[in-house]
Image (tube, helix red, strand yellow):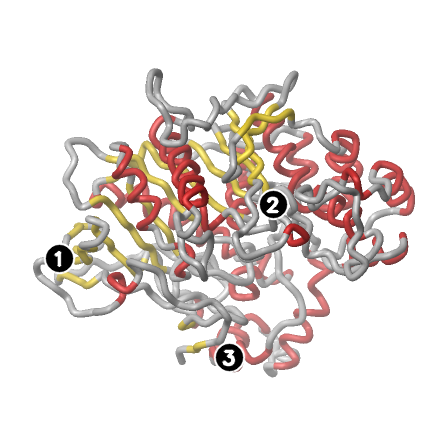
Amino acid sequence: MIRSCIFTITYFLVGLASFVTSAELSTKGPKAKTLNGTYVGKYLHEWDQDAFLGMPFAQPPTGDLRFKWPQSLNEAFDDERPATEYGFSCMQYGQNLTLDEDCLTINVVRPAKKHSKPLPVLVWVYGGGLYTGSSADPRYNLSGIVKVSQDMGEPVVVVSFNYRLGMWGFLQNFNLLKEGSANAGLHDQRLAFRWIQENIAAFGGDPEQVVLWGESAGAQSIAYHLFSYDGRNDNLYRGAILESGGITGAQIHDLSYYNVAFENLTRTVGCWDQKDQLACLRKVSQDALFDAHPSLTWNPLIDGTFLTGYPSQLIRDNKFNALPIITGANTDEGFAIGAVNTDQDLFLESFRWRNYALSPPTIRKLMQLYPNDPCYQPPYAITNCSINEKKGRQWRRGVAIGADITMISGRRKMAALFTDAGQDVYSYRFDQRIYNRDEWDGVKHFDNVAFSFQNISGELGPSPEYDSHVELAKTIGQTYIRFVNRLDPNPKGGERASNSSLPQWPKYDMEKPKNIVFNATRNWVEDDTWRKEGIEFINSYEVARELYG
């Protein structure tokens, strides 16, 4: 049974309506012949683009395939099938999306103009903590970034897809691990990457020029792939753009952590006393499983194959696939922290929400490295050392610690690792506050996404009333398109960026590490050395092992 849940985002974006207004198959629509059969997409007049939406890339993960790794499509079809509407979103809570377990679909948007050679490919992996998200989310409309590439004369094909979330994608149990079904959601992503390799040429894309792009848990997922199979390179992609996420930041637990949650789930749906609990769970109706509403977030597991060790171990042993990357984070990433006034408040609030288990010596050292001095702590738009009593006297201190643990230390670690491995790395800090927020709101996690996707509207992102915001979005989009085309975000020699204030984006250098800072007023290059001692401590093997595994 199809589910629909409620959330607060207005389901509108210019151009999105043309994606989904009709499922009627038009023989005049653009066509693409994949390995399994021919799809007919939709021409988007206002963008001069072709969109192919909701194409299955795996067998439905239902019935006996529930919780298992995705299975490749095994049937061909002779008729032409419509690809004019998004497929179902994967099962999750708290979103205004049409949900179903049969959700493993992929979308391709390309310039409508035919080109003499295959185009580079940019692949979006959505975030949402691995428990929410969808390629149908209007904030992830692919047409904006494709339009940037068209306007630049460096056209690309852009792809997005769905992967299973929460317990549907990351249920963890000994028997699941034993049967080889752990981390199904990550394998959904991997199968989508393989589908792209096998089929993107049918859409005018070049399978040898694929770059992955993700934000938050999407970037974290990409990092897991870079560290998967001990860093084995299967040539599924040649570079990556990581926005506010990396191999560290989210904790990986062992199996015992999930025992109580698994017991609660099986008791709720009547499978606890069954000899084969997994077989029982696979027979439970979609609605009954949904209504069980598990009590925790399910995360990836060290399964011995895809992930052979904890992040701290894989980093220490240099077991990763080194490729050119863009990696960045937002200025004030740690704003999810609540009000804090004392040291006790700070550590209860800072670490309880992520289930971090820090030792007393580590906590004491963090207190030393992050003193309660609001003059040097987020939000950085406030430079007068003031304190917001409603947020608490140690709130700014907590935001600094929270940002560094969850996002910024990982960004700096990824930049250092891949630079040391001899790859070109470009690091950024996004520093533009959304137009309708005051300075105390800061530049939060996810704020950059509207700019990356060119979603210039009052409800979904930067306001079109501000030319500087529109220009910043275009500038960011252009750097990404150049990277997809040439693995370098800078203009070719002699070219000028649309924003004349955009400086040369330097490669990351361990001796003199630099970030480019994206801001609507001006863009500049900064030394990537702020909060150096604290971030180095967080990135040390011993502390990283406590934090993330």
Residue 284 numbered mark, or none: 3
- Mark 3 or 1: in front is 1
- Under circle 2, the secondary element is loop
Residue 47 drawn at (x, y percent): 23, 50
Vertical side of 484 occupied by 58: above or below = below
- Name the disc covering residue 517, or none: none
Question: Which residue is found at the position 60% from the left and 24% from the top?
Answer: 514
Depth check: 362 or 15 in front? 15
User: Would you say 233 lies left or right of 166 here?
Assistant: left
Q: Amino acid at mark 3?
A: Val
Q: How many marks?
A: 3
Q: Is residue 378 left or right of residue 464?
A: right
Badge 3: how crowded within 10 Å, few (<14), some, or many (20+)? some
Secondary structure under the numbered disc 3 in the rendered image = loop
- Please name whichever residue, 329 or 395, is drawn nearer the observer in this view of the structure: 395
In this picture, is 528 found above or below 53? above
* Residue 51: x %, y % from top left: 24, 54
Q: Is residue 458 left or right of residue 546?
A: left
Q: In this view of the protein, which residue sits in the foreground, 457 or 365?
A: 457
Image position of 41 (left or right of 481): left
Q: Amino acid at mark 1?
A: Gly
In the image, 440 versus 65, the foreground residue is 440
Give the label on residue 304, or none: 2
**Residue matched to label 1:** 29
Q: Residue at x 49, y 81 (%)?
A: 287
Q: Position of residue 499 (x, y in %)?
A: 40, 31
